[in-house]
Amino acid sequence: MQETQDLSNQRGSLYHFILQQIRERPAQRITFAEYMDWALYHPRSGYYVRTRDKIGAKGDFFTSPHLTMDFGELVAEQLAQMWQLLGQPTSFTLVEMGAGQGLLASDVLSYLQRRYPDCFASLHYLIIEKAAAHVTEQRPRLQHWLERGLNLEWTTLEEIPPNSITGCFFSNELVDAFPVHCVTWVDGQLREIYVSEQDGQFTEAIADLSTPKLAEYFDQVGIQFSDPPYCNGYRTEVNLAATDWIKTVAEKLDRGYVLTIDYGYTAAKYYSPSRSEGTLQCYFQHRHHNDPYIYVGDQDITAHVNFTALQHYGENAGLETVGFTQQGLFLMALGLGDRLAQLTQTEATDIQDLQNRLQQREALHQLMNPMGLGGFGVLVQGKQLTRKETELKGLIQG
């Protein structure tokens, strides 16, 4: 990692801000979670705050909504069924958490208005967005919905009253961007990896855990590093922010669903002894690497999601696990296969139509590719649901 730290872009204001925070601490170190939070969300210089292209062809990565509107339409199909299962309430709230550029919201709303007008008429659409730069992109894209009278608002989780939501909290590639703690198994002990500095460069330091919640986390998800024995120096991540988040979401939901789509694993796979370097990844101009200490504020930093933790901490907070599947299977159950078949069953009208069909076909294949987007996890949790209300179309296979 050190050889890349001399890059000129390392000497920006955010870099020096974090160095100053380290120097001001009594132990001359900060947790990796603090470092990651500042690198991504510092109010002036964080990656998600700055107004530059991050998602799409000109950015650092792309998501399913950027690939094709089919993703949003198929998600909308599931949301519409949720509304139906809940008895078609006259007030049905969708809370999108981490709405990116607003593409998923736009596709969901367009599809519901076109195919499920009664559901659309009942909608209250809330967007929770921490990244100010994303809000500036979302507002103009969604402005016409406000002009048409849609009940659309930007808010925060904290502003939503407890037990006030009947509907669905949903997110796509949100939890992977929560700041994580980094830990390591050394000489038979669980220790934490901190960020320190030496001669103006970031270094890592190993010390005692910053909070007992880290050890408790592994007890909660059933991971024992001593059995089977993990290699000395094994390192991984703990997303305590995700456990707090799912508890808060559970508090706000009165009746309905939580739909979480992201890349990740169950705890047994996430913390497999063979995954000895963890899952931390950085994305810069569509290239990925594992050095979070370069391009500070200019690159995305992510860690895979531990879906077992979301399930367990959600259950402790009053959510039941409705189902867990892969994105490819989820979308196929909602009609992706039918869309593929329709592309081949009708003839193209001209060359442009043929090219559009080929592009759409490629996009649909990417959505269900088990080695890529199709391998993402889809977790559905619920609160105050009858058995019938848990029979979701997207979770029925075959």
Image (cartoon, rainbow, N blue to C red):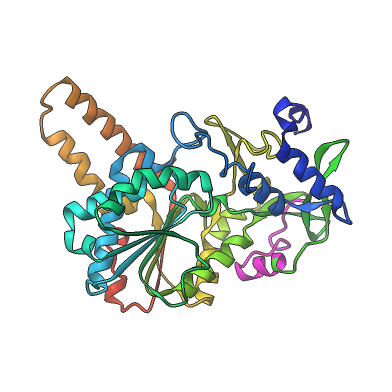
Judge whether residue 285 can be spotted in this image. yes
Quarter in which the N terminus is drawn: top right
- Please determine whether, in this image, residue 157 is positioned above or below residue 350: below
Residue 222 included in the magenta stretch of the image: yes
Q: Residue at x 51, y 36 (%)?
A: 54
**Figure disc tally:** 0
Q: Give the quadrant of residue 258.
A: bottom left
Quarter in which the C terminus is drawn: bottom left
Q: Is residue 227 left or right of residue 104?
A: right
- Please determine whether, in this image, residue 272 is positioned above or below residue 374: below
Q: Residue at x 26, y 34 (%)?
A: 361
**Prevailing SS of the magenta stretch:** loop
- Nearest the viewer among 318 and 230 is 318
Q: Give the quadrant of residue 323.
A: bottom left
In the current view of this chain or complex, which residue is farthest to the front? 147
Rendering coords of residue 377 (x, y %): 44, 53
- Nearest the viewer among 221 and 251 is 251
Q: Give the quadrant of residue 5.
A: top right
Residue 230 included in the magenta stretch of the image: yes
Rendering coords of residue 336 (x, y %): 25, 46
- Nearest the viewer among 398 and 164 is 164
Judge whether residue 74 can be spotted in this image. no
Range of residues picked out in magenta:
214-231
Q: Is residue 396 left or right of residue 129?
A: left
Q: Is residue 22 left or right of residue 51?
A: right
Q: Residue at x 51, y 60 (%)?
A: 307
Rendering coords of residue 65 (x, y %): 37, 43
Rendering coords of residue 271 (x, y %): 62, 55
